[in-house]
Image (cartoon, grey):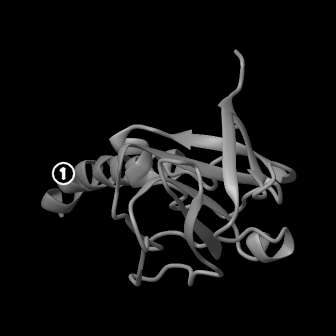
Amino acid sequence: MRFLLGTLPVFLVSLLLLTGCGEEEESTTPRDIPFRADGVLEFVDADGQRLEAIAIEIADTDSARQRGLMDRRSLPERGGMLFIFDDADERSFWMRNTPLALDIIFVGADSQVVNIHRRTRPLADERYESEGPAQYVVEVRAGFTARYDIDEDTHIRWRRRDN
């Protein structure tokens, strides 16, 4: 009995500490990542006429490009992410940890669309690749490219938001 009474306080304190750690971990896990408008991107046809414009988050660092739209449960209708790379090269993206279906648009150094993967499968390990060198990649909600007639004749123009 004395052993039980001596270990009971230690057990209760340990239980409280473990419970507190679990709650703290739970509260720091993001429930959803809010969209951050870093700039504006326009899709233009071969004649330079604007097809549509979107607000963009810009991913121009290794960590931002690796994170991309992972764990995002929402994206504005006219919102997207622009991935900027230092040079044009073959690119490959996947949807692991991305719960949204997306259109992935690969864009060359000349700002012309190289190819588009429409309605990608969420949370999949399937790789979506460029069909030529791409310096930029734009991700938008699935169906966006069909709705606004974005195709391989389309170019992009973008600018950062003035702070």
Residue 107 picture location, percent across and down:
53, 57
Q: For the point 43% across and 70% down, which residue is it?
A: 130
Report which residue position mark 1 lands on: 6
Residue 159 picture location, percent across and down:
67, 31
Residue 84 picture location, percent across and down:
47, 43
Q: For the point 58% across and 81% down, which residue is it?
A: 120
Residue 149 picture location, percent across and down:
81, 71
71 sits left or right of 48 in the view: left
Count the marks.
Answer: 1
Q: Is residue 22 visible?
A: no
Mark 1 surroundings within 10 Å by alpha-carbon count, few (fewer than 14), some (14 through 19), many (20 or more): few
Q: For the point 72% across and 61% down, which residue is it?
A: 74
Quick check: 154 above or below 42? Answer: below
Q: Secondary structure at mark 1?
A: helix
Q: Quadrant of residue 154?
A: bottom right
158 sits left or right of 6 in the view: right
105 sits left or right of 163 in the view: left
Residue pushed farthest top? 163
Quick check: 155 above or below 40? Answer: below
Q: Is residue 66 visible?
A: yes
Q: For the point 42% across and 49% down, which residue is it?
A: 65
Quarter that holds the N terminus: bottom left
Q: Quadrant of residue 64?
A: top left
Quick check: 83 above or below 4? Answer: above
Quarter that holds the C terminus: top right
Q: Nearer the viewer, residue 162 or 32?
A: 162
Residue type of the residue flagged with mark 1? Gly
Residue pushed farthest front? 47
